Image (cartoon, helix red, strand yellow):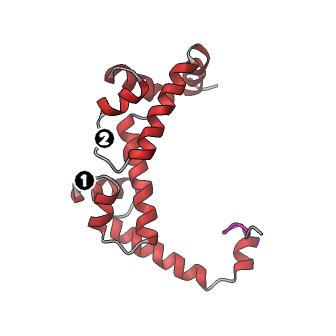
């Protein structure tokens, strides 16, 4: 067992209520990621002081609440850049970032490409997939089989 697993197990076993409260705060982030959230707001959903919450959240999930929030926003931005015809600026504000510069920088750091390049690569990939027969994609598990 590694140290992280031990800490998570300890949190669950000694105080299942603590882990439940941390999950409640994480769910709040998942639902409100597009709003300008701060640590006080998030920690209040877990009924902890901000510093206690920050320490417990990091122990339980191996990242800070802010890192989790940024990851959630980046994931949603990737979805929007792949599927919507929104401008990068619109995507930035849609997912809750207040600055295009910080959005682009964090996106590039997380994904490895700037948002506009990610969009282009995603569209190229989608166009290439349209040229491949669906049965081939399903057979090689590149897409799920259609449900009846």
- Which of label 2 and label 1 is nearer to you? 2
Q: Quadrant of residue 86?
A: bottom left
Secondary structure of the residue carrying numbered label 1: helix
List the residue tagged with mark 2. Answer: 37
The reply, left or right, for residue 40 in relation to residue 134 is left
Q: In this rendering, does residue 57 appear at all?
A: yes
Outermost residue toward the top in this view: 14
Label 1 neighbour load within 10 Å: few <14, some 14-19, many 20+: few
Of marks 2 and 1, which one's residue comes earlier in the chain?
A: 2
Q: In this rendering, does residue 62 appear at all?
A: no
- Image location (x, y in percent) of residue 15: 55, 16
Based on the picture, tell me whether residue 119 belongs to the magenta stretch: no
- Image location (x, y in percent) of residue 25: 44, 33
Query: Which residue sits at x=43%, y=49%?
Result: 72
Q: Quadrant of the C terminus?
A: bottom right
- Image location (x, y in percent) of residue 3: 55, 23
What is the chief secondary structure element of the magenta stretch? Answer: loop
In depth, the one of 27 and 139 nearer the eye is 27
Q: Quadrant of the N terminus?
A: top right
- Image location (x, y in percent) of residue 82: 45, 70
Label 2 neighbour load within 10 Å: few <14, some 14-19, many 20+: some
The reply, left or right, for residue 79 in relation to residue 142 is left
In depth, the one of 87 and 119 nearer the eye is 87
Q: Quadrant of residue 49?
A: top left
The reply, left or right, for residue 121 in relation to residue 2 is left
Query: CA–CA distance between discs 2 and 1?
Result: 16 Å
Query: Which residue sits at x=38%, y=21%?
Result: 48
Q: Which residues are magenta?
A: 139-145
* Residue contact between numbered discs 2 and 1, judged by CB atoms under 8 Å: no
Query: Which residue sits at x=46%, y=71%?
Result: 83
List the residue tagged with mark 1. Answer: 102
């Amino acid at each position: 067992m590694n140290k992280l697993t031990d800490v998570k197990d300890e949190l669950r076993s000694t105080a299942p209520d603590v882990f439940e409260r941390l999950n409640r705060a994480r769910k709040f982030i998942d639902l409100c990621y597009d709003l300008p959230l701060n640590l006080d707001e998030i920690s209040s959903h877990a009924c902890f002081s901000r510093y206690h919450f920050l320490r417990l959240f990091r122990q339980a999930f191996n990242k800070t609440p802010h890192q989790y929030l940024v990851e959630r926003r980046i994931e949603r931005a990737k979805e929007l850049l792949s599927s919507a015809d929104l401008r990068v600026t619109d995507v930035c504000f849609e997912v809750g970032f207040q600055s295009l510069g910080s959005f682009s920088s964090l996106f590039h750091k997380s994904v490895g490409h700037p948002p506009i390049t990610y969009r282009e690569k995603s569209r190229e990939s989608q166009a290439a997939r349209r040229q491949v027969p669906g049965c081939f994609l399903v057979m090689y598990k590149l897409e799920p089989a259609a449900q009846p």
